[in-house]
Amino acid sequence: MRRGLSLRLGTLPSMFAPRRIQHCRVCGTATAYRVPADDNRERAVCGACGEIHYENPINVVGTVPVWGDQVLLCRRNIEPRHGMWTLPAGFLELGETVSAGALRETEEEAGAHVQLQELFTVLDVVRAGQLHLFWRARMLDTHLAPGPETIEARLFREDEVPWEQIAFRTVRQTLEHFFADRRAGRFELHTGQIG
């Protein structure tokens, strides 16, 4: 009961290691973590100017690019999980919408030209402080020009997907949903949480 109560009040599970803000972004003075008035969780508060600094989840955006009965995967040229396969995705940048970020990541990582379709998966990765959003995307052609973060980009049929070499659980779950929905003949929005 105490665990449920503490989570309800906003304390984070012990496995979550939040980014720690040590200095005020406004004046540079050291911050201290405390619960501000009218709040319910610790925040980094500046001891000099009183600025409250909020730490929020990072958005990861990407696509499930499809050409016929194949999906496009990228082999990672960066850590974490160097050499493993993933969907084209990455961190949302300031000043862009989530859909524009998904298109940008697809272009940067795979050099693929796609038409964005509907939002397909929304997966919370609470441990990492992330939210992963994937859109289905129709490839406009098969020309690929992977960027420096990708060793190679390749199309796979379901029975060819290197399941044991998929880099992230969110990608695996998104692919599993995609192939299951395709077999069922209808695509739905899938939400969930990765532990």
Image (cartoon, helix red, strand yellow):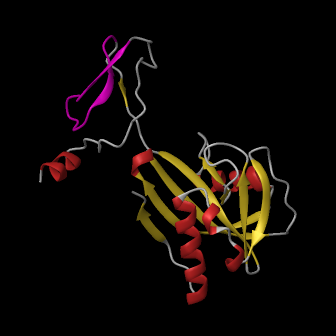
| Range drawn in magenta | 30-48
Residue projecting furthest to the right: 143
Residue at image point 59% right, 50% down:
97
Query: What residue lies at 77% left-to-right and 56% top-to-bottom?
Result: 110
Q: Answer with left or right where residue 70 lies relative to residue 61.
A: right
User: In x, y percent, where is residue 37?
Assistant: 20, 29
Q: Is residue 80 left or right of residue 30?
A: right
Residue 75 versus residue 72 in the image, above or below: above
Query: How far across and down, in percent of the image, does residue 122 sit?
Result: 48, 62
Q: Is residue 4 visible?
A: yes
| 86 shown above or below 3 | below
- Quadrant showing the C terminus: bottom left
Image quarter of residue 86: bottom right
Is residue 120 in view from this perspective? no
Q: Residue furthest front?
A: 164
State yes or no: residue 44 in magenta. yes
